[in-house]
Image (tube, coloured by chain):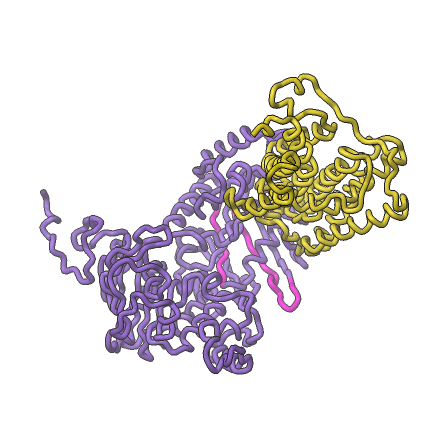
Chain colours: A purple, B yellow
């Protein structure tokens, strides 16, 4: 097979760091090629070099055998390189058609809007990227916005598509749809560069994979015949434990009792419908489910951030259903929200301020209305040390840290208050393999020290490797609570889509709410 | 309610709308490309002064208008340079231009023309009457004895709408006001488009100023804009950053002022009536007409890291 794009010895240094150090890459005609690496491994820098956003210090890029030099993305686009950035380059206030044709609009002085719509419609049929060209971008889902980005590339006659962490913001269904599109492109002979740090999806979609670590390419391998473990080890540079060994469960008394709780979402719709479960000291209770099935509303309600419209929440025997979030915090509930940058941290505050966000009103962090900066700093520094936050500098702004270290800071703040219940939502979203391992170890340590933990995650593997018991939520109902160590992917996957494995029948809405269901309607499994 | 049938009320409304609609239109152009522009007041004053001065020196009000446009473009260019190239704070910059405009025009008036102000012989722009319009019932009331700039303003409103929403350049200008990085990656020249928006805005504001000095009068007075640049700012927001919206808002504010003029000497105290446009401004901005959303990148300088 011919090489479509070749990168040889590409080097780019920024003050203090060599982001790309003699990077080599060969993309063959018509293949899906993944670039796998941890955050900070230099994947994005490499893409920006290929796309003309950065200029290399040395090395060469060859397109179809000819050396090319891009001064700006314009040159790269002209040469037939299409790129979908991780953060979309779209204009929400404009329509799909406007966004696609911008910079190369049909018409003379006048903008020929009709022609633009016609062309976009034709492209979306050709590449099976269904989207209405006349709607505003702002009203589209993330998955559809991504399609518009891909259309933008093909409107400019891209011969190669680069997808930078394309699944980071997608739901599992949207990811599946994207993969269908990518496979279709491959069938049409269009090579795709697929940037990712997720092993599973790389194995799912790519033909070959080039692994990057610390700015260098450590090797290219054929996906077929390579195990996830081998890829993970290549990526991190040491043996990674994908599934951590756990201590045996040593559960204590019940800490949290949720009884028949219903929760209203922000849109006034009932998102959680009569859910009951309890969590004991020293266990991790996982909540598995497809995004949008009420799992986040449920934990928001336990933390006091969503409106409970029915049922009771008891914490250490005390009814807390109507308590304010602050009171719940004081009584020993800690919460790590799913969006760490929006809800977990104040990015413009330094680590000292962020670690005392919940406690700044109390001694020793303040007295008589004055903040005691030195006490706060001592505390922050002790947490930074204990949780190995890097760089270990309390004066850094939270926004300057990597995602993994931001998560450590939140975890440190919450755990540092010595809570008896810790709720963590999506604790490793967007983190790389090394960082995930660190967070997982921390959570298990907390479990072994007798904390009750609720873990909500959209990653089934995460739920399965950590949880002692797993509650599966579907359409706001807890369908079943299963034993963690003996649960299988297939069993959970079926439950997540609302199907009970025993009878193979989709559950009617509004039937089962119980936690253990030794299944009554067995006879419905037979013929009519 | 007989005053509602008086041509004076409606002619006054349209006339008073000119020095609001033009700078509001100017602000719209600037902010659509992503540069917050509160400097309309200062640019209007500069336009008003140079219109009167050049009208007097050359003996031609048309050359006065041209001088105002050139002066407006120049001051807007300075503003654009500081806001775009130097990435200075646009609100502070706008305030600085307002203060500078008030100061420099007062200074020039006194040094050049002395304390008597611009000579009474200064020519002004003509009024015109188009019979086809003037004889239409009701509509004719609006166009009773209007300056040529009234017609120019109306034409500019329509042209601005067409330009912003139906031309390729207009689409590009709106794009850089929403997401300059996206526009840049598609090969648009963000800085040049922003310069264009700000300078068009300066020219329009300056014509608004010229209307005050050589449109309805034939002289320049210190601080003769009297806050109209700020009301225009409100009209721009009220009009949701669209030309027709800006014009509509300007007409509403102008109507309130005109009403106060017509009802003078009536039972209602004049001071209360002259408060009307300002009260309307507050109500409008308090969200009476629904929330208006500024262009997403409005006020954020665009800097490149290469």
Q: Identify the image quadrant of residue B119.
A: top right
Task: Check if residue A26 falls in the magenta segment.
Answer: yes
Figure quadrant of the C terminus of chain B: bottom right
Task: Check if residue A395 falls in the magenta segment.
Answer: no
Eyeballing the image, is B220 above or below A210?
above
Any part of residue A406 in sight: yes
Q: Looking at this view, is A35 or B53 the one in front?
A: B53
Residue B20 pos. (x, y %): 67, 39
Write the residue at 51% across / 39% down: A96
Residue B273 pos. (x, y %): 62, 41
Write the residue at 78% across / 49% down: B102
Write the residue at 77% across / 46% down: B223
- Dominant SS in magenta: strand
Q: Identify the image quadrant of residue B11.
A: top right
Task: Determine whether, in the image, residue B43 is placed left or right of residue A152.
Answer: right
Residue B172 pos. (x, y %): 63, 39
Task: Determine whether, in the image, residue B7 is placed left or right of residue A373.
Answer: right
Any part of residue A486 in sight: no
Number of numbered discs on residues: 0
Residue B17 pos. (x, y %): 66, 35
Q: Looking at this view, is A294 or A282 the one in front?
A: A294
Figure quadrant of the N terminus of chain B: top right
Eyeballing the image, is A471 above or below B160?
below
Give the residues drawn in magenta, as a range: A13-38
């Amino acid at each position: 097979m011919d090489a479509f794009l070749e990168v040889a010895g590409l080097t780019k240094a920024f003050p203090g760091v060599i982001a790309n150090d003699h990077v080599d890459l060969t993309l063959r005609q018509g293949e899906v090629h993944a670039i796998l690496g941890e955050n900070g491994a230099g994947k994005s820098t490499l893409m920006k070099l290929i796309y003309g956003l950065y200029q290399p210090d040395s090395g060469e890029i060859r397109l179809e055998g000819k050396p090319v030099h891009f001064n700006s993305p314009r040159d790269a686009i002209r040469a037939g390189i299409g790129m979908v950035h991780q953060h979309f380059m779209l204009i929400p206030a404009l329509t799909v058609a406007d966004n696609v044709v911008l910079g190369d609009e049909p018409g003379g002085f006048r903008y020929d809007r009709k022609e633009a719509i016609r062309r976009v419609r034709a492209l979306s049929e050709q590449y099976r990227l269904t989207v209405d060209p006349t709607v505003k971008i702002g009203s589209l889902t993330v998955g559809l916005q991504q399609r518009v980005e891909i259309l933008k590339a093909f409107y400019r006659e891209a011969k190669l598509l680069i997808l930078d962490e394309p699944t980071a913001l997608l739901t599992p269904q949207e990811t599946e749809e994207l993969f269908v599109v990518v496979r279709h492109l491959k069938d049409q002979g269009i090579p795709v560069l697929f940037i990712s740090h997720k092993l599973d999806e790389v194995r799912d979609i790519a033909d070959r994979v080039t692994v990057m670590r610390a700015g260098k390419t450590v090797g290219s391998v054929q996906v077929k015949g390579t195990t996830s473990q081998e890829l993970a080890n290549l990526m991190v540079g040491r043996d990674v434990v994908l599934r951590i060994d756990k201590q045996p469960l040593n559960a204590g008394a019940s800490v949290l009792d949720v009884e028949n709780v219903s929760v209203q979402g922000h849109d006034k719709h009932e998102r959680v419908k009569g859910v009951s479960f309890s969590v004991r000291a020293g266990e991790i209770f996982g909540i598995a489910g497809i995004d949008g099935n009420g799992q986040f509303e449920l934990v928001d309600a336990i933390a006091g951030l969503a409106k409970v419209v029915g049922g009771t929440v008891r914490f250490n025997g005390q009814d807390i259903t109507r308590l304010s979030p602050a009171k719940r915090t004081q009584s020993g509930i800690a919460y790590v929200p799913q969006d760490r940058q929006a809800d977990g941290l104040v990015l413009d505050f330094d680590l000292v301020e962020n670690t005392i966000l919940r406690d700044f009103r109390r001694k020793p962090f303040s007295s008589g209305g004055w903040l005691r900066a030195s006490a706060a700093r001592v505390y922050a520094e002790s947490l930074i040390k204990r949780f190995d936050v890097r760089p270990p500098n309390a004066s850094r702004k939270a926004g300057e840290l990597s995602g993994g270290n931001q998560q450590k800071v939140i975890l440190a703040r919450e755990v540092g208050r010595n809570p008896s219940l810790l709720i963590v939502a999506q604790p490793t979203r967007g983190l790389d393999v090394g960082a995930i391992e660190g967070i997982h170890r921390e959570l298990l340590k907390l479990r072994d020290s007798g904390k009750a933990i609720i873990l909500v995650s959209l990653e089934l593997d995460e739920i399965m490797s950590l949880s002692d018991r797993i509650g599966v939520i579907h359409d706001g109902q807890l369908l079943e609570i299963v034993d963690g160590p003996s649960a299988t992917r297939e069993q959970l996957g079926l439950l997540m889509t609302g199907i009970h494995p025993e009878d193979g029948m989709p559950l009617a809405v509004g039937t089962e709410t119980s936690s253990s269901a030794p299944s009554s309607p067995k006879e419905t499994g037979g013929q009519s | 309610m007989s005053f509602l049938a008086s041509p004076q009320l409606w002619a006054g409304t349209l006339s008073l709308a000119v020095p609001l609609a033009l700078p509001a239109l100017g602000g719209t152009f600037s902010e659509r490309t992503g540069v917050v522009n509160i400097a309309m007041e200062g640019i209007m004053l500069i336009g008003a002064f140079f219109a009167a001065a050049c009208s007097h020196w050359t003996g031609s009000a048309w050359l006065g208008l041209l001088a105002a446009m050139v002066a407006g473009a120049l001051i807007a260019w300075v503003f654009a340079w500081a806001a775009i190239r130097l990435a200075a704070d646009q609100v502070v910059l706008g305030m600085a231009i307002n203060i500078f405009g008030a100061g420099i025009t007062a200074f020039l008036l006194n040094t050049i023309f002395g304390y008597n102000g611009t000579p009474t012989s200064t020519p002004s722009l003509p009024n015109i009457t188009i019979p086809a319009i003037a004889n239409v019932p009701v509509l004719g009331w609006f166009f009773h004895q209007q300056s040529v700039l009234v017609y120019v303003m109306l034409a500019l409103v329509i042209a601005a709408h067409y330009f912003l929403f139906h031309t390729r350049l207009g689409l590009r200008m709106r794009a850089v006001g929403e997401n300059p990085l996206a526009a840049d990656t598609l090969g648009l020249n963000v800085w040049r488009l922003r310069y264009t928006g700000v300078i068009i805005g300066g020219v329009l504001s300056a014509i608004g100023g010229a209307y005050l000095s050589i449109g309805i009068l034939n002289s320049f007075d210190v601080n003769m804009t009297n806050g109209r640049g700020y009301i225009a700012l409100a009209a721009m927001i009220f009009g949701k950053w669209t030309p027709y919206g800006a014009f509509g808002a300007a007409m509403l504010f102008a109507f309130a002022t005109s009403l106060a003029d017509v009802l003078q000497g009536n039972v209602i105290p004049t001071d209360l009536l002259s408060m009307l446009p300002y009260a309307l401004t507050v109500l409008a901005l308090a969200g009476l007409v629904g929330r208006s959303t500024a262009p997403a990148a409005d006020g954020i300088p665009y800097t490149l890291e290469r």
